Amino acid sequence: MEYQGICHKMQARITPASNATLPSHVEYKFVLDQFNTDLMQCLGEKLQLEWTGRIFCVSCGNATPKSYSQGHCFKCFKTKAECDMCILKPETCHYHLGTCREESFAQQVCFQPHIVYLANSSALKVGITRQVNMPTRWLDQGATQALPILRVGSRRLSGQVEILFAEMIADKTNWRALLKGEADPVDLVEEKEQILDQFHMELATLANEYSEEELGFLDDQPLEFQYPVQQYPHKITSHNLDKTPIIEGKLQGIKGQYLLMDTGVINIRKYTGYEIVLRM
């Protein structure tokens, strides 16, 4: 079978285990325009990805010689709010200064409820996401465990909490460690209690500063996820479509936004906006 279209990040969903004490299973679909191809049937089979040499902006749809900020042309990269630095560093949000690029984007994204969470992917980390993005955010990161700990009223506040907690816990994922195997299990409830105790005074200060916004403690239970991986690579070799437009190999697993092939790994999200031919 052969499919061709503009590449977007893979769609991940969970299927709860029959026993509530077991991890939920993660399943993936490869997205090329309107085609959503089930990848679960491809595990253990040969796949080929070919980049046609063309890239299209995921915002305006125009052809672009280079992709910026995960699939944007240079014009959109410089003008769209979703490409602003405050998306990567929410604590630098400048809406209150009157310099936001798009009012509508701020209302739809930045001033929606956000969750501050703990997750275990390559190791324990702290992160943030809009409430509507759970559990997708954790699946995109390849987390095997996740626990929401706070709900806040804006992206800026969530970023400030994340920076605070990052003094104690990392806020980045080691992608190489992620693809070498499962992270050692972590007691997320215990970690949550420690971090909230460590920063209770600072959180009280933030709650007072953002008195018009929500800052609430959550009492959720940890979630666990199991990814469709038959075999992890012994050595991490990364495919690059910009240098090698055609790659192929046996699909040995999927984790986060990575395809694990016997010839190397590839981060599909990196190639958002690329016109891809998928053969399987």
Image: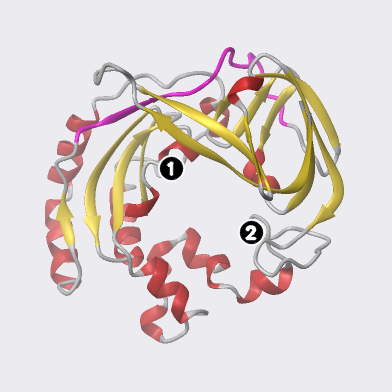
Q: Nearer the viewer, mark 1 or mark 2?
A: 1
Residue picked out by circle 1: 136
Task: Name which residue lies at 62% across and 77% down.
Answer: 79
| 87 w.r.t. 273: above or below | below
* Tag 2: amino acid: Ser
Q: Left or right of 80: which side holds 153?
A: left
Task: Identify which residue, 44 or 110, lies in the foreground.
Answer: 44
- Segment colored magenta: 221-238
Query: Which residue is nearer to you in this view: 158 or 170?
Result: 158
Q: Height in image: 96 above or below 178?
A: below
Q: Is residue 230 magenta?
A: yes
Q: Residue at x 15, y 37 (%)?
A: 193
Residue 177 drawn in magenta:
no
- Relative to the observer, which residue lies in front, 62 or 194? 62
- 162 sits to left or right of 67: left
What is the number of the mark on residue 69? 2
Q: Residue at x 17, y 37 (%)?
A: 194
Secondary structure under tag 1 reads: helix
Report helix, strand or loop for mark 2: loop
Disc 1 or 2, which lies upstream in sequence?
2
- For mark 2, does the 10 Å Cα neighbourhood hold few (<14), some (14 to 19), or many (20 or more) residues? some
95 in relation to 224, above or below: below
Q: Return the mark for residue 224.
A: none
Residue 141 visible: no
Badge 1: how crowded within 10 Å, few (<14), some, or many (20+)?
A: some
